[in-house]
Image (cartoon, rainbow, N blue to C red):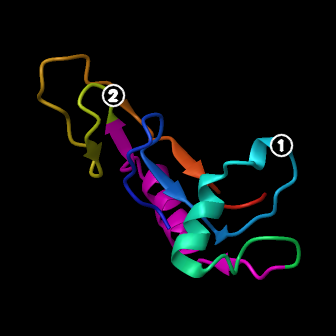
Amino acid sequence: MAKITKISWTYGTLNFWEGCEKVSPGCKNCYAEERDQRFHNGQHWGAGADRKKSLSAFKETLRFNKHAADGRFIVCDGCLVFKWNGEECFVSHTGRAMRPTMFVMSRADG
């Protein structure tokens, strides 16, 4: 599901499913596994575990793609405000419009 996030380099996240398994030493301190443990008792983690699927993420992707095609899914790179209808930003900076970066599959294997 797409959400506004505190991750500095992205404007939102989309997770089509949640769950994974440790495949390397880099997975030792996985935040997504800790989150799954905290909210779902770890039931989506490990080999063969059922993944928590998100139908809303698929719907959000279709909506974002439609907005992008219509020129409505843009962000001001100066103030970082979403400009869903393509309106101009009146803050005194460059105010160039750009499409937002989305972090896809932040809590899952791919």
Q: Which mark is residue 77?
A: 2
Instruction: Verify whether residue 55 appears in magenta.
Output: yes
Q: Toward which corner of the image does residue 48 lie, by quadrant? A: bottom right
Q: Find residue 99 and report its horizontal and vertical position in percent.
A: 45, 39
Looking at numbered disc 2 in the image, what kind of residue is underneath it? Asp
User: Who is closer to the viewer here, 43 or 79?
Assistant: 43
Q: Which mark is residue 100?
A: none
Please say whether residue 107 is visible from this viewpoint: no
Q: Find residue 91 and report its horizontal and vertical position in percent.
A: 12, 26
Q: Is residue 20 above or below residue 88?
A: below
Instruction: Name the residue that disc number 1 marks.
Output: 25
Magenta extent:
49-75
Please say whether residue 28 is visible from this viewpoint: yes
Q: Is residue 99 above or below residue 29?
A: above
Camera-nearest label, 1 or 2: 1
Looking at numbered disc 1 in the image, what kind of residue is underneath it? Pro
Q: Find residue 11 and report its horizontal and vertical position in percent.
A: 42, 45
Which residue: 60% across, 62% down? Answer: 34
Q: Residues within 10 Å of mark 1 (few under 14, many from 20)?
A: few
Q: Mark 1 and mark 2: span between their CA atoms?
A: 36 Å
User: Who is closer to the viewer here, 82 or 34?
Assistant: 34
Q: Is residue 67 above or below residue 74?
A: below
Instruction: Verify whether residue 63 appears in magenta.
Output: yes
Residue at disc 2, secondary structure: loop
User: Who is closer to the viewer here, 27 or 64?
Assistant: 27
Which residue: 67% across, 48% down? Answer: 29
Q: Where's the C terminus, which quadrant? A: bottom right
User: Who is closer to the viewer here, 106 or 86?
Assistant: 106
Q: Toward which corner of the image does residue 19 lie, by quadrant? A: bottom right
Which residue: 33% across, 28% down? Answer: 77
Q: Residues within 10 Å of mark 2 (few under 14, many from 20)?
A: some
